[in-house]
Structures are given as structure tokens and as C-alpha cells.
Amino acid sequence: MDDLKPDDFLAKIDRKPPKTGWMDTPVNIRKGMYCYASNPKSVEYLSLPNARKWNPLEEDWKLPENWQEIIHNGFKERLERFRSIKIFMDVCVRCGACADKCHFFIGTGDSKNMPVLRAELLRSVYRNDFTLTGKLLGKFAGARELTIDVLKEWWYYLFQCTECRRCSVFCPYGIDTAEITIMGRELLNLIGLNIDWIATPVANCFRTGNHLGIQPHAYKDMIDFFVEDIEEITGLDVTPQMNKKGADILFITPSGDVFADPGTYSCMGYMILFHYLKEKYGLDVTWSTYASEGGNFGFFTSHETMKRLNAKMYAEARRLGVKWIIGGECGHMWRVIHQYMDTMNGPADFLETPVSPITGTRFENASGTSMIHIAEFTADLIKHGKLELDPSRNDNQIVTYHDSCNPSRGMGLLEEPRYVLKNVCNHFHEMPPNTIREQTFCCGSGSGLNAGENMELRMAGGLPRANAVRHVHEKHGVNMLSCVCAIDRAALPPLMEYWVPEVDVCGLHELVANALILPGETERTTDLRGEPLPGMEDGADE
Amino acid sequence: MNFMYMFPLLAVLVLMLLAYIGAGACGLQSFFGIVIPYLALLTFLIGFTRKIMGWASSPVPFRIPTTCGQEKSLPWIKANRIDNPDTLPGVIARVFLEVVCFRSLFRNTKNELHGGKKLIHSWEIWLWVFALAFHYSFLVVVLRHLRFFIEPVPFCVKALEFFDGFLKVEYVDNILQIGLPGIYVSGLVLLGALIFLLARRMIIPQVRYISLAADFFPLFLIIAIACTGIYMRYFSKVDIVGIKELAMGLITFHPVIPEGIGAAFFVHFFLVSVLVAYIPFSKLMHVAGVFLSPTRNLVNNSRIKRHINPWNYPVKTHDYDEYEDEFREKMVEAGLPVDKELK
């Protein structure tokens, strides 16, 4: 990967299907395209099945003796539990409309990355095990037995799907490959076939409250570190409340925001915003070290694991006695909160319908879960003129906006971040319509695939996104790609570095905080990154 | 992948031959005209019902609509109430448009790597056009056939026939020598659309690659049905009166086999029977599945109203007490509040 130049990468993409039919083309597990197998310690910590050391490149995957039976029974159980999967197994007409909608197919040209074929990998086994025509006609009906080679193919391609749901927008029956991948990964987990980039964060999150395994004192240290940085830039102490009982609002954001650039600048952004609101309007927000993770890699393991991790949000809200919850910028976190949380861990009858104490806005759209997205919260503040903003402080940034998959296609958060952006910066340009909003392209690293060892896969998956960014970079001089997702903030910088090196990546609230005029602040000479503000280039060195 | 379409093509030819010889030379007209159609209908009714019941027996544990527009949030933000429905009427509109206009397919784009450098996503309308053409012309053809099963023929069926046969060619009779009756547009459109869909499957490499025998079989079957129908109407002189007598007999459960119905009709009728019986066991069930698809038929209001999962079960979590027990010392040292003080 290191020596593969972008031009050669593009030249290498070959969409021509293999000469042999897909059932007769064995899987070739290739370095750079897969993630390492899960660490047995993590699997054990979560009491998930078949913890052992294994290597996908080796012949023997050390499966339990009766693995076929486990998968068959697991499949049966899921067909009985999920109407979605039952219907999606039956109704596909293979029209092919989904084929070139998938970023992994576009970027790799691999036929089995067409959503329809990814689903057929499971469907073929479904037909063999559960349908009359499959049993009678076998291959003629598109049925085949689950052999070890088919299983390996499942594993390889189910971890080449980021559950972004773009194909489901175009499918005439709404067949959602994310649903199929979720189910497939659940089956694989029954026999211990996970990847470490998912299993270990899940184990960490279970124990310490966040994916990165940051213990409470270290979490506090990191926040304190930001406090110092912010004091240097603004002259103000913005120390937030932590684990504070009786606060009005609990704030939960992905731990990636406290850990790695450029997420850290968004984290500083939240801190600055909350400080501003506390000083001006007395807003009472607390952070939590126990619920210090907004994201949920359990979602990429199984429904059960998702529920086990998500439970902390309501548990902590109840323990602290807050009235409602604000969630930070994150993609799949919001799919979980929006579409799963209340069903799994609700009802949130101990919380109130969120009401912004500053604007009086009642967030009826979250009256059940009592949890709102920070972009909704901030957009409402700006609309009511409650934030004093100087967008010219962001004048060095020519910004575009990347819709994260989950808030777009699993929620519908499209306008709020745009409204905020247009108010905090003066130069904003949209990418082409087929690449934003509900048609947005994934960063290529979602659903737990943002590891280091599968960089070639990530660069391939992120190609359509990068290509659209390059378009606005060339057309409008865009140099900043904003987003509301922690995985994006981790995954897009290397993607940009590879495909469009002139473009940087930031979160929404980094730009908000740059523009926000704090009462009593010293004159700012730099932005949150320590880069000189427009017109301050000379003074910044002093 | 040749056998993926050779096998179904052969199957359809064998079926045709079977009916041709069976009802013709072997004189098994009652079998092909009465027994098979009844069996086919029964298979369809039982199979279809069982499939739907099977789907319905599995719950929808989570509210998972694919949202394709702005959700309803703040009052001053315009929500897309059809593609991201927040109410039942919105969902009904969404499913209606999906079923009637193939709305999702309408969005179809084509992606190309332009000049080996730049990805271009352009609007791709043809699959939508021909899919729509196929389904609607097929519908018209089916409705037209009601004239055989209802006596007197209802006005709406007559009207449909009139408009469908609008492109009458009587005035060029002398040149074309086609003669009456006028040509039905639906039949031509149906055949044209079928040929497009088939050609697409055979020519576009990716679509050919994903196609199964089960994708070609219904295409060949319906093409054969259309061709035999067209043959009977425009080329052979079938005994329409006799066929209506047979159809009326079937529908009133007093089946009769009138004299003089040619073997061509039995081939046509047998293929239709096969199609009807085949539906419940095939991808043709998409006709019902589209109504039940959880990504399309659910209201996106899961932050307002709690969606109940009937099998929601308790899971093992790591609660705050366990967490604090492990980290209490470090928390106290860092100045974080704790529930239980250090001993």
C-alpha cells in the first residue's frame, strides 16, 4: 500500500467480473484488505463464544466442531426474530441497481462487493437450508451448502461492508445490506469470527466506559489538558463538570474526540460552547467518565452486544439524576440512539422531554428518548440569536460538509449541521448532489473497519468520497472537510492525505468554537489548532 | 454462466412442448384445461398465503426506516415528510409511490471512472423506464383478459380495450394485410420491455454475473406467454367463443372443454398456470414484499414513540458500581466524585 501511488491505484480498479461464476470463485483473503482477528482476551472478557488465537491467513480457523450446526440454528433463530432479514432473503430480483452504489465496489471493482452479491453470499445458504426450491434444485435455484470456503467468504466480505445503507436508498424494495451485514456478523460472532478492531474496543468500552479503554482519571487528565490549551488561546478557564449529580443535562460524545486530532478540537469546541452557555445563561451540563463513549462498536458485533454497551447511557442519566441528554457528533452512535436505544434500554420515563433552558424550545422530536443531537441544540441557539459569532475567524477555511452515513440514512439529520456551518463560516460549498445528504458516500472506514492493517481497503472504500472532495477542492478551493462523526474524523485525514492532500478535516463544533465570542476572552490570535487567525499571521509567532 | 440461461430457456421450451403434445396429440385437454389451472391456482393461493404469513410471523423488533430526506426536528426546518415520514400518511405516501412509481429505482445513477481519473455519477433512467413499462403493460394485459372471465364484459374492461387498441391499423389494412382486430399497445410494450430486461441481463457484464437461472426463467416464461398470446390473436384464428366458454366454466366451477380450441391456446394457458404456481416460490414475491419492507413502511419517529421489541431480553451489563469498585482509588485521586468513599 505504501508504494501504491493514487494513479496506479485507480488504474488497478477492474470492474470486469471474473471468468468463473461467483459460486465457483474461491475467496482470496488478501493483505491490506482485511482486519486482524480478535484478541482472545477481549472475546473472553465479554463472555462471547470461542475465544482463541486465530489467523485468517492460516488454513485452520479453529472453529468449534459443530460450527455448521451453530450457524444453521443461529440463522433460523434470526429469521424468526427479524422480519427484515426474512423478506430481504426472499424478494431480491437482482436488478443490479445497487451494484455501483457501493463505495467498496466502486473502489475495488470486486464483484462480490456489489451489495447484491454480498447478500447472495448469505442468500445462497438460506435457500439451501430453508427453502423448498433450494433443496430441490440446488445450484439452479441459486442454493449452495455452507462449506468452510463459503464461511471464509462471508467473513471476508461482511467485513468489507460499512453498513452505510447507501444501496438501500436505491433498492426498489428497500433491501438494506446493513441489515444483512449486521445479521451475518452476528452469525460469525457465534463461532468466534470477529475482528480485533471491533472486539477490543467493545471489551474496553464494557470495562472503562469507552472504546479506547481510557480510565476515569486519565479521561479527566485529557480534559484538563484541553482546558489548558483553551486557556492559552482564550485566556479563560472552561473546566467542565464531571460525573456531577443533579446537573440538568448529561453530555455524551465519542471517546475518539478526547483522544486524537482532529476530534480533540471538536471536543474543545463542546467545552467552549458549554462554558459560554454556562456563563451567559447558567446552563448546567455534566460529562461522565462511566458513560464516556457515544459510539457503540457493539453495534458491529451483535444486537445483544450493542444493547449491553448502550445501557450505560440511560443508567448514568438515571444515577446522576439529569433531566435529559445531549449527544455529541458521531455517526453510528446516532443510528443506535435514534433507532435502537429506546426500544432496547428504554423507556426513559425518568427523564424529561428536552427543553432548551436558553431558547425555551421544546424538542418534541426527542420526547421519547430525551436525547438530542448537539447540532440540533446549537442550530436552535443560533436561530434564536443566542450565540455571539464572528464567522470571519474561520475565513481561512473554505469548507465543505460530509454527511455521515448513519445520521443521513438512519435518522435524517441533514439541515441542522448545514445551518450551523453557514452561520459560523463565510465560505461553504456543497459537494455534488449525488454524493451528499441521503446519497452521501461513506468514509470507507465505518462499522469498525478503521484499523491500520486494512489501509488499502479503506483507501478504496473512501475513493468516491475523496473524489467528490477533490471536485470541490478544484472548483472552489475547498481546504476543509467538515463532518459530524468521530470515525470520520479519524478516517478522513488519512483518506485526504492519500487522495486530496490539500484538504484538512474538522468537526462542526470546532468551527463553532472558533467563531464563538466568549465574554471576557482575550483577543484571539489563533484558532483551536494554534494556527493564526485571518489577519493575525504576524502576531501569532510572538 | 451459460447454463444460467440455457437451463431456464430449455425448461420453458419443454413446458411448451409438453402442453402442445399433451393437449394436442395425446388429447389430454381436460388435464391441461381444467386440472392444471385449478392446481396452479390452489398452489398459488396456499403458497402465497403461507409466504405472507411466514413473513408476518417474524416481528419487526426495531424501527429501521432508511431515511431519504430531512427528518422532522425543529419547527423552522423543512422536513421531507414522504422520504422521511414522521406520520402514517407519510408512510402510506412513501409506500404508494414506491409501489406505483418505483420511486427508489427512479433515483438510479450510473457510476463511471471518467478518463481513469474522475468518478462521475450520472442519472440512469432506462432501467426505471423499462421496469415501469413492463409492469404496467403486464397489468393492462391481465386486466384485458378479464373479458374472458366476466359475462357481460364490464364497461371498464371494454374501455381499457378501446384505449389499449387505440393504435388501430385498420386504415392501412390493404397494405399490411394484418386485418382486424386492432393491435394492442400493451402487448407490444410488454414484449419490448421484456426483451430489454432480458438483453440487459445478458449483455451488461455485472448484471449477467449476478443473474441466476431463477432470474431468466420468469423472463423466458413471460416472453413465451406473450408470444403465444400474440400468435393466437394476430396470426392463428383461435376460437374466442370456445375459449370464453372454457374460462367461464372454470370460474363458475362447471368446467367444460368446448370443441375446436387449438393446441396453441393450451400452450398459452399452461404457461400461465406455471407462472401463477411459480410465484410463491420465487423472487416474484417482491410483489408482496415491497409492502412489508421495514426500511420503507415504518414511521421515523423512534425518538418520540417507543417501539416495542417483543423478544427484548435482559442482558449482562457492566454497571456503575462495578466500574467504581474497580477505579475508585484513581477517581478519588483525580478529584472525581464517587458514590462510596474510600475505606
Image (spheres, helix red, strand yellow):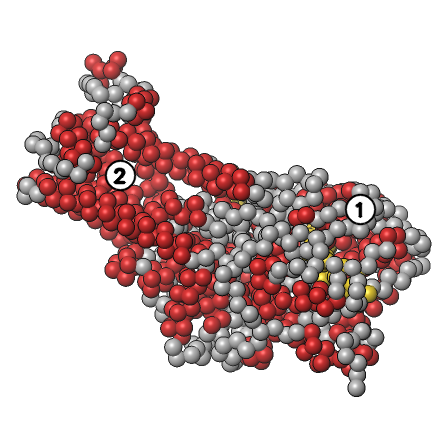
Crowding around mark 1 (Cα neighbors within 10 Å: few <14, some 14 to 19, many 20+) is some
Q: Are marks 2 and 1 on the same chain?
A: no
Above or below A293: residue A177? above
The amino acid type found where label 2 is placed reads: Ile
**Residue at position x 28%, y 25% in the image:** B154
Task: Please give the residue where the numbered disc 1 appears in the rendered image.
Answer: A359
| Residue A461 image point, x, y percent | 56, 56
Above or below A225: residue B249? above
Q: Quadrant of residue A426?
A: top right
**Between B101 and A81, the one nearer to me in the picture:** A81
Q: Is residue A27 visible?
A: no
Residue B149 located left or right of residue A201: left
Above or below B132: residue A497? below
**Between A402 and A274, the one nearer to me in the picture:** A274
Disc assigned to residue B223: 2
Residue B177 located left or right of residue A513: left
- Quadrant containing the N terminus of chain A in the rendered view: bottom right
Q: Can residue A147 be seen in this view?
A: yes
